[in-house]
Image: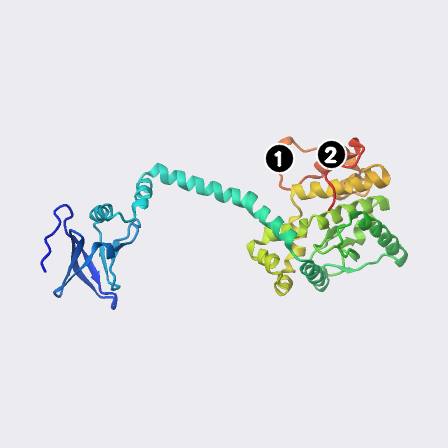
């Protein structure tokens, strides 16, 4: 049957693939009424109802593709005529507006800018929010695995050594820690590990330090004990560390720092994976520290504990200053305030900011608004 061509839609020139081989053949495609007619070199001629025709959405720089029911296809560079065919058949109607936007440089530039803004917002707020949610949802057995593997990593790697404190001194500190954890609550299996932060041949010295692991293990070094002028200062530090445990700051920081891979641990409770990644926990805690919000929240809790127990936050203020100055004779007055601009640009709170916050807690003369879990 001979089908007269549609005058409004001139024949398309292009190439034909039969769907069985990669060989291409020169071809033409014409629309006539409700049918499309294909002619290809070699004498091939066939036709289909226009409703059987599929037209792939346009991709800039790529030939337009028209597909037929038997798996064959026709490809052409004549985008203008294909667009007319789309308009005639009502195909890809919604994409026409997108195509018009893509051809305008200012809309493309605007879309790029919007994408960059969205990516930035996701990195700044989305990932931290996901990390906090994942940390909250991580099962307790996974937390215990993180603690166990992290301590093994630190001890096997020579970062921590046995404490040189006397048994009597260690017992005093353990008793104080029990009082702090009874106040902190949360149902965590708290334990205090007293360790030498400067063992011989250590890869690097932890020095005067204390840090909390996600499952409730708190490590405090002999060097920090030696730096303190009183146990009040050490108990203030321990109260601060329990705040990191109850709010799961450490785990959220690890998730955020190491990416979405670890989020699967939270969702699946995969203890094997938790063990695999546990070595990253101490590195993330010791290298990156906590965020400004996390430190402020933990200080808030420590301030409440000190106010309730001693009526002042001065012990924590002083030992923070001593850690900052690396001077055993320093106190809170030894720390100089930075400029407001410097404060705003810091991702972690400076010591001066933390001391100011603790002074504010004391000035209020009452427990701060936020509370430990």
- Alpha carbons under labels 2 and 1: distance apart: 15 Å
Residue tagged 2 = 356
Q: Residues within 10 Å of mark 1 (few under 14, many from 20)?
A: few
Residue 351 lies, with reference to residue 43, above or below; the image says above
For the rendered model, the colour scheme is rainbow
For this rendering, which residue is in front, 164 or 129? 129
Q: Residue at x 64, y 49 (%)?
A: 288
For this rendering, which residue is in front, 361 or 338? 361
Residue 226 lies, with reference to residue 344, above or below; the image says below
Residue 22, image x and y in percent?
A: 25, 66
Q: Residue at x 75, y 36 (%)?
A: 368
Task: Please report contact status of discs 2 and 1: CB closer than 8 Å, yes or no.
Answer: no
Element type where label 2 sits in the image: helix
Q: Residue at x 60, y 59 (%)?
A: 265
First along the sequence among labels 2 and 1: 1
Residue 166, image x and y in percent?
A: 88, 57
Element type where label 1 sits in the image: helix
Q: Is residue 325 visible?
A: no
| Residue 365 quadrant | top right
| Residue 230 quadrant | top right
Residue 140, image x and y in percent?
A: 69, 58
Residue tagged 1 = 344
Q: Residue furthest right?
A: 168
Residue 164 lies, with reference to residue 130, above or below; the image says below
For this rendering, which residue is in front, 216 or 153? 216
């Amino acid at each position: 049957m001979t089908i007269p061509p549609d005058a409004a839609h001139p024949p398309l020139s292009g190439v034909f693939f039969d769907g069985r081989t990669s060989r291409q053949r020169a071809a033409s495609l014409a629309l006539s009424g409700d049918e499309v007619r294909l002619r290809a070199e070699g004498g091939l001629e066939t036709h289909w109802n226009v409703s059987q025709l599929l037209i792939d959405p346009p991709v800039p720089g790529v030939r337009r593709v028209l597909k037929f029911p038997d798996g064959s296809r026709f490809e052409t560079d004549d985008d203008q005529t294909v667009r007319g065919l789309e308009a005639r058949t009502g195909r890809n109607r919604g994409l026409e507006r997108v195509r018009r936007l893509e051809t305008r440089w200012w809309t493309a530039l605007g879309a790029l800018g919007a994408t960059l803004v969205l990516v930035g917002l996701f990195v700044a707020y989305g990932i931290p929010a996901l990390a906090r949610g994942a940390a909250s949802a991580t099962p307790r057995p996974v937390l215990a695995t993180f603690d166990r593997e992290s301590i093994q990593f630190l001890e096997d790697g020579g970062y921590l050594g046995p404490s040189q404190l006397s048994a009597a001194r260690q017992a005093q500190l353990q008793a104080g820690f029990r009082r702090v954890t009874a106040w902190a609550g949360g149902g965590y299996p708290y334990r205090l590990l007293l360790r030498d932060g400067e063992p011989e041949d250590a890869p690097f010295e932890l020095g005067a330090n204390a840090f909390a692991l996600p499952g409730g293990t708190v490590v405090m070094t002999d060097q920090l004990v030696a730096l303190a002028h009183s146990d009040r200062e050490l108990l203030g530090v321990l109260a601060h560390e329990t705040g990191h445990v109850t709010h799961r700051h450490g785990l959220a920081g690890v998730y955020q720092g190491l990416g979405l891979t670890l989020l699967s641990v939270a969702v699946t409770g995969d203890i094997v994976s938790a063990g695999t990644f546990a070595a990253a926990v101490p590195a993330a805690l010791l290298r990156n520290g906590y965020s400004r919000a996390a430190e402020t929240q933990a200080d808030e809790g420590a301030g409440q504990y000190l106010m309730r127990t001693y009526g002042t936050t001065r012990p924590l203020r002083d030992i923070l200053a001593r850690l900052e100055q690396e001077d055993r004779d320093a106190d809170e007055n030894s720390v100089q305030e930075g400029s407001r601009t410097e404060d705003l640009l810091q991702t972690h709170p400076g010591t001066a900011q933390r001391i100011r916050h603790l002074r504010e807690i004391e000035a209020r003369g009452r427990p701060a608004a936020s509370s430990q879990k």
